[in-house]
Amino acid sequence: SQTIHQWPATLVQPVGSPLSLECTVEGTSNPNLYWYRQAAGRGLQLLFYSVGIGQISSEVPQNLSASRPQDRQFILSSKKLLLSDSGFYLCAWGGQGPLTISGANVLTFGAGSRLTVL
Amino acid sequence: QKEVEQNSGPLSVPEGAIASLNCTYSDRGSQSFFWYRQYSGKSPELIMSIYSNGDKEDGRFTAQLNKASQYVSLLIRDSQPSDSATYLCAVREFSGGYNKLIFGAGTRLAVHP
């Protein structure tokens, strides 16, 4: 079965500092990977998704970026954090391989990384 | 952007009652629907998925889908205090060759003894 690792679990960063959140997946190859953010009291907002190494699609323009340097590694970064970047960042695995409209891929989430920007 | 709407709650029900959680979506072409449960401070976990009109039962949970009304619901029978959580409705969107899940903001359920 697939296991998703996220780290760090919790971090407090000052405004203007850089950020790097890492996600790795075990038990699968060629996974579809996603980064979601959940602001306090809000729903899940899709930030980035990736279907393979070096393939990143961005959903929301902002000061965050994502990279997929290895098949099972997905990294979320920022050069300069804003107060509004605070939130609960969730990496998710959603099946593998080519996607079809009839596919029933479900999302499985990692434990999340809670970021507070002060 | 497709939209998924949920009442934020809180929905308060007594232990043993039926909790009814509702969700509407904007994209008439949507085909796959999911309910996730999220305990405070934790990540969401999948409870149910439903793809066809009608009811789908799994233990104490029943998902109901009405594509004509663009409405999906989750019923929890014999509610327990351990069911107290936020329930997220999600709709699968397929665009640009990729699958994505669009989430509602969630309904907070409180089951009191």
Image (spheres, coloured by chain):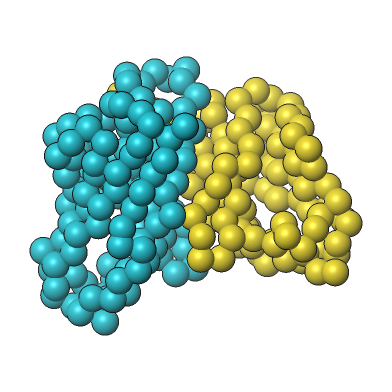
Residue A26 x, y percent position in the rendering: 35, 36
**Viewer-closest of B53 and A1:** A1
- Determine the image quadrant of residue B51: top right
Residue A25 x, y percent position in the rendering: 33, 39
Q: Residue furthest bottom?
A: A118
Point out the image quarter for the C terminus of chain A. Answer: bottom left
Which chain is cyan in the rendering?
A
Residue A34 x, y percent position in the rendering: 33, 42
- Determine the image quadrant of residue A14: bottom left
Residue B56 x, y percent position in the rendering: 73, 29
- Residue A105 shows in this picture: yes
Q: Relative to B31, is B79 above or below?
A: below
**Viewer-closest of A11 and B52:** A11
Residue depicted at x 36% and y 21%: A99
Q: How many marks?
A: 0
Image position of A107 (left or right of B96): right
Residue depicted at x 24% and y 41%: A73
- Residue A46 shows in this picture: no
Image position of A26 (left or right of A78): right
Q: Relative to A58, is B16 above or below?
A: below
Q: Residue furthest right?
A: B16
Which chain is yellow in the rendering?
B
- Determine the image quadrant of residue A64: bottom left
Residue depicted at x 29% and y 48%: A23
Q: Relative to B4, is B53 above or below?
A: above
Q: Relative to A22, is B74 above or below?
A: above
Residue depicted at x 81% and y 55%: B79
